[in-house]
Amino acid sequence: MEVTCWLIALFVILLLAFAFVHYMTSSHGIFEKLGIDIPPKSPVLGHFGHSLKYGVFDVQTVFYKQFKDKKVYGWYDTRTPILVVKDLDMIKDILVKNFNYFVDRRVPMEHDEPFRDNLLTLRGDRWKHVRISVSPTFSSGRIKKMSPHIERNAKILLGNLKEKQESGQEVELKEMCGFFALDTIASIAFGIDINTLKNPENKFAQETKKITNPNPLLFAIAVFFPVLAPWLTRFGLPFFPNKSMKYLASVVDSVIAARKRDGTEGTVNDFLDLVTSEAQEQGVKERLSLSEIHAQSIIFIFGGLETISTVMSFTLFLLAVHPECLERAQKEVDEKIGKDFPCFENVQNLHYLDMCINEAIRMVPPGIFLDRQCVESIDINGVHIPKGMVVLIPVYAIHNDPSFWPEPEKFDPERFTPENKETRHPYSYLPFGQGPRNCIGMRLALMELKIAIAAVLQRYTLVPSSKTVYPFHLSKIQARTTDGAWVKINPRK
């Protein structure tokens, strides 16, 4: 009897192992059929081991160089086949010319409300509806209306920097810029004012932290077994904590209700105000649902927090370790803005600072890759792309390709003079994507960066500190340095 039980258990284990291997490898082999080269892979986990070995940045550059003479190469993200596209003309065709074949992004798992209806993961006509409805909110006129919220939070940032400077403390820029980014998102997207450095335990910051640092076990399940992800939600184990998501949605609801009650609707000029106002509906046939408004406010956190904190911290850090560039940027701020506080109008003339920001993005793009999913089979430049294939554009590797960017490890804002930009392929620089599905908040993000950085440079000189490590080494999993972006803050004379 005991032997029989062991045999049954062994049979079940072998059966489950066979089912697992079959599930993980069922899509392997597609690139061999298409005649597309791939790196050596694991029989079961595809190229996942390379990702673990090299990290999200170096895994791009290593195989980008290995297949330097190829337009594309294949990659198995565990069981999911991904076509990595290196050829810039093909990239243009995918993002712009043949956009209708690549309208969707890859969505590893579906989400429940309130996150479900966000622009990043919506597909097809639903995405088009929300994009058309939200786009007017990011026009120049409406960004100008939102800019006072950025200025107010930039002043809070300066106050926090002043305390650090007066106490002689060194400043870790990624953390400090993260506080500023979160405070600004709270103000623009949720209509509330916070000061996270002074009050790190505030409810908004705590709930945001929970959704931006999901459970690693659930993350692993979503990566390896996306088919199981919907069942996790049904059993009360969602990828993003329900309580946190409901809290963020309730903030939106309470702010909208309070403004209607107080008669201040249409006068606050933040995202919620503009997206719900009558003026916003000009030319828009269908108003956004409340769930769609929730989702767009929440996506500010995912789309804006890491982007702003990464670009701002690296720009300031790179200026600190390149004093000649810092001095030139400060001189421009002095000449173009003077003693006025940076605002929507006066930062438009900060062309050299704009070059510095672009160069920092080139070196460390917050969006290290772009992805699209083919919705209808198509041939591009002699490469057949079947329906359902995920296409990945290795932005970090392209931004560090010496054939486009000589000495790519060198910080050189002069790369972005109008004359130098004319000599390069326009798709060699992809900070916010291209085409109809590019980053909708690009202009708002750049305005936020210029106002905040100009405000810092106007009052302080950043210099290396005892903790500064340069050249920096990037983390294997996110756009931050392994040793921190440490500087010392000196008041300008």
Image (spheres, rainbow, N blue to C red):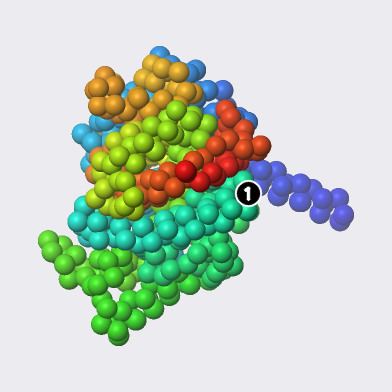
Residue plotted at (24% across, 72% down): 267
Specify the farthest residue to the front. Answer: 493
| Residue at the limit of the structure toward the right, as seen here | 2
Q: Can you identify the residue that label 1 sits on?
A: 168
> Which residue is at a point 42% across and 30% down the rendered structure image?
325
In the image, 120 versus 71, the foreground residue is 120
Q: Position of residue 245 (x, y in %)?
A: 48, 67
Left or right placement of residue 381 versus residue 36 in this view: left
Quadrant for the N terminus in the image: bottom right
406 vs 373, nearest the viewer = 406
User: Residue at 27% of width from left, 78% of height from top?
Assistant: 264
Query: Residue 224 versus residue 318: which sits nearer the camera?
Result: 318
Q: Is residue 201 left or right of residue 28?
A: right
Q: Secondary structure at mark 1?
A: loop
The answer to whether 226 appears left or right of 154 in the picture is: right
Q: Position of residue 240 (x, y in %)?
A: 52, 61
